[in-house]
């Protein structure tokens, strides 16, 4: 299979994602410039973290107008896989490819640290190598990672089992104290209804080798390879 990593002006995790795919997963990968209008030939596209277009207006609000996003939307319609990480998650919500939105963290502080997340749905393209309720240690680095949806949308997301990761403590307890940013229902990651698009605030590409502090993030990225193998 082949991965593509989109680069927007202001992206700063594109090289991390590229390294994780090429050097750790040992999979073919290419960069995709934000002005590209054709993404055919890629099985999974990654929208990496960073500060696309300087986070002007709102995080991800300008990036959704990049030419590449039309091609990305077509990729999704054809059943292609797509994962947005941190700023990539914000872009997916702004683009309407995922429900809800990301608002500033409670406390209005930038948070950069390892957190624990519990696997809420282990049957997706992005979590199939995880076990039900498994706790993963993966870093976050964001100011606007507070997931929000209105009550009707939130109920639909929960009823459809679209939540794939929730913030938790080391024992897997989903508590308010374990929630770093105020996200509703401790939501750290979701998928679309079809299941081929995922968004998450934690950075799995930064946790693919034990020397980095954890290799739990490899389970997320390797799950994509496993499902498409």
Image (cartoon, helix red, strand yellow):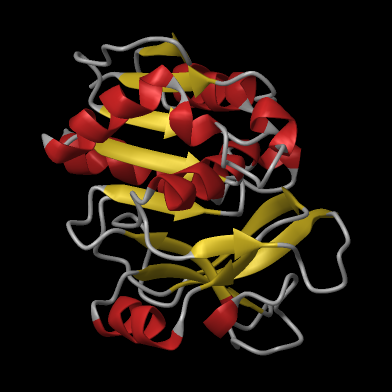
x then y, percent, for residue 104: 74, 62
Of 136 and 105, nearer the camera is 105
Q: Is residue 78 left or right of residue 42?
A: left
- Percent of width and height locating residue 221: 42, 40
Residue drawn at 51 percent across, 18 percent down: 23
Residue at the image point whose x is 71% and y is 38% from the top: 55
Q: Residue at 55% of width from left, 51% of height from top?
A: 216
Q: Quadrant of the N terminus?
A: top left
Q: Provide residue 189's location: percent of width, then percent of height.
A: 48, 62
Q: Residue at x 71, y 64 (%)?
A: 115
Q: In the rendered image, which quarter is residue 110 located in?
A: bottom right
**Residue 206 seen in the current view:** yes
Quick check: 120 left or right of 118? left
**Residue at far left of view:** 78
Lateral position of residue 76 relative to residue 31, left or right: left
Note whether 83 is above or below 191 in the view shown. Answer: above
Q: Height in image: 84 above or below 29? A: below
Relative depth, front residue between 31 and 64: 64
Q: Residue furthest front?
A: 57
Instruction: State the quadrant of the C terminus.
Output: top left
x and y, in percent, of residue 111 in the image? 83, 57
């Amino acid at each position: 299979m082949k991965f593509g990593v989109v680069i927007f002006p202001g992206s700063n995790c594109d090289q991390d994602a590229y390294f994780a795919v090429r050097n750790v997963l040992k999979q073919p990968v290419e960069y995709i410039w934000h002005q590209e209008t054709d993404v055919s030939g890629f099985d999974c596209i990654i929208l990496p973290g960073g500060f696309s277009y300087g986070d002007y207006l709102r995080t991800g609000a300008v990036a959704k107008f990049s030419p590449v996003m039309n091609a990305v939307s077509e990729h999704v319609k054809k059943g292609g896989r797509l994962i947005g990480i941190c700023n990539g998650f914000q872009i997916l919500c702004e683009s309407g490819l995922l429900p809800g939105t990301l608002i500033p963290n409670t406390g209005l502080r930038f948070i950069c640290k390892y957190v624990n997340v519990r696997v809420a749905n282990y049957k997706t393209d992005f979590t199939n190598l995880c076990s039900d309720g498994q706790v993963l240690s993966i870093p976050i680095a964001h100011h606007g990672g507070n997931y929000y949806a209105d009550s009707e949308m939130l109920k639909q997301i929960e009823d459809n089992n679209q939540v794939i990761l929730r913030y938790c403590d080391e024992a897997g307890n989903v508590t308010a104290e374990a929630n770093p940013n105020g996200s509703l229902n401790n939501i750290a990651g979701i998928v679309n209804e079809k299941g081929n698009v995922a968004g998450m605030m934690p950075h799995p590409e930064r946790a693919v080798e034990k020397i980095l502090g954890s290799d739990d993030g490899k389970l997320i990225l390797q799950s994509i390879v496993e499902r498409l193998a």
